[in-house]
Image (tube, helix red, strand yellow):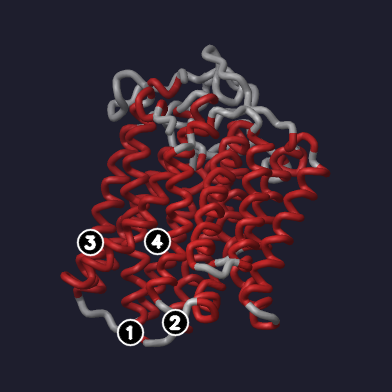
Amino acid sequence: MDVRPLRTSPPFRALWIGASLGSLGQQIATVAVLAQVWELTGSPLWTGAIGLAAAGPAIVLGVAGGALADAMDRRSLVRATTAVQLLAALALVGQAAAGNRSVLLLLALVGASSGASALGAPARRTFPVRLLPSDQLAAGLALQGMAFQVSMLAGPALAGLVLAQWRFPAAYGLQACAVLISLAVLFRLPPMPPLSPTASGAGNGGGAARLRRPERGGWLYILRRPTLWGAFATDLSATLLAMPISLFPLINEIRFDGDPRTLGLFLSAVAVGGITAGLFSGTVTRLRRAGAVQLTAALVWGLALAGFGLAGPLWLALGCLAVAGGADTISVVTRGALVQLETPDAYRGRVSSVEHVIGMAGPEVGNFRGGLVASLTSAPVALVTGGLAGAVGVLVVAVTNRPLRTYTLPDPEPETGPAGAPAPEPAPDPAAPATVAGQADRTG
């Protein structure tokens, strides 16, 4: 694993610690909300409504957050949205301690937290490219992905233990503590005003949070850059056509007698594959051909899930899922580095909001597609056809999009900023470290 970003950039290290704890807290809260809604209603319809309560505000406010991220200091925006998340987390503690019996109130708080997170997500995605040199950006994204995969394994298990011993207030309390730490580390970051394509850093407002008019054409910039729309099309091909999670219970019922332990292993196998890819991510993040790496990883994802649909023995099924999880991690890391380095800073907020919405909506629609196809045919057919269709979609992007296929990450330029523009000197910040290594040397 390439851990240079943690060694060379104290601000990125603080960001990584806060984001890792925040992700762990979110996993704990997710399990607690699921358990509380089930306890209140005993209805799978209401547990399914949790996803709608979270996804709706996330999609709408994610788009708005992109425009705000290109119009004001991004650090200030993320501070404000994280503070709202903290208030929502404390409200979850309060409703649990008061013995709330209203599922609508619970879902409203879930929506508020999700919306606040989404409003700040585009700005947060631009942090690593401002804190790291270009040759360390992919490594920084890999470290963030690794932390997320670990939280997926550890968070639900920890939530189960806490819920069994101390019930819902304690679980939500842990999430509130994690969000508080995430908010605190944001004060270790330098100001991050958006930079105009021609600005040298002067006159960008220092750390001021005032609004300014964003550069025009931010949303259309994606269509003008084949590398950007190609990277997004690759991700959509993989998630819309080959997302498997909604089919896990049916496959488990058909092939493994519905054993709940096996169902848990399916999800764990995906996370184990992602963690393994993270442990060896240094072999990938140092590769310069990011477009080819993303296309190859997305192709492997689709083929591995088709293999999962055909697998008979449990060991083979879990192996296919682990390969898919590893390929997904590599694809996400390389796409993230490509998108941030290919986008001028003045447009990064809006482009990052598109990446966020695709990351939210693609898997959800893909899971719906899988369930629909399985209801008309069978789970194995849905998995095999979806995996192969996803692989074909990736191949079509690869054949028709030469700029993505041949894209090479830029060489590091010590005297300039990561996106090729002169690196700005941030205004002094009493909360930032005395030496901000990341400004000379930037994820979401």
- Which is nearer the eye, 263 or 194? 263
Describe residue 12's horizontal placement relative to residue 372 as left or right: left
Residue contact between numbered discs 2 and 1, judged by CB atoms under 8 Å: yes
Residue at the image position 64 percent from the left and 68 percent from the top: 383
Q: Residues within 10 Å of mark 3 (few under 14, many from 20)?
A: many
N-terminal of the pair, mark 2 or mark 4, is 2
List the residue tagged with mark 4.
Answer: 113
- Which is nearer the eye, 105 or 286? 286
Q: Label 1 amino acid?
A: Leu
For marks 3 and 1, give the CA distance.
20 Å
Residue at the image position 60 percent from the left and 33 percent from the top: 346
Extreme residue toward the bottom, this view: 42
N-terminal of the pair, mark 2 or mark 3, is 2
For marks 2 and 3, give the CA distance.
23 Å
- Helix, strand, or loop for circle 3? helix
List the residue tagged with mark 2.
Answer: 46
List the residue tagged with mark 3.
Answer: 173
For marks 3 and 4, give the CA distance.
14 Å
Q: Label 3 amino acid?
A: Gly
Dot label at residue 40: 1
Figure check: 390 above or below 188? below
N-terminal of the pair, mark 4 or mark 1, is 1
Give how far across and how far down residue 31 sits, in percent: 34, 68
Q: Label 2 amino acid?
A: Trp
For marks 2 and 1, give the CA distance.
9 Å
Give how far across and how far down residue 50 sits, in percent: 45, 73
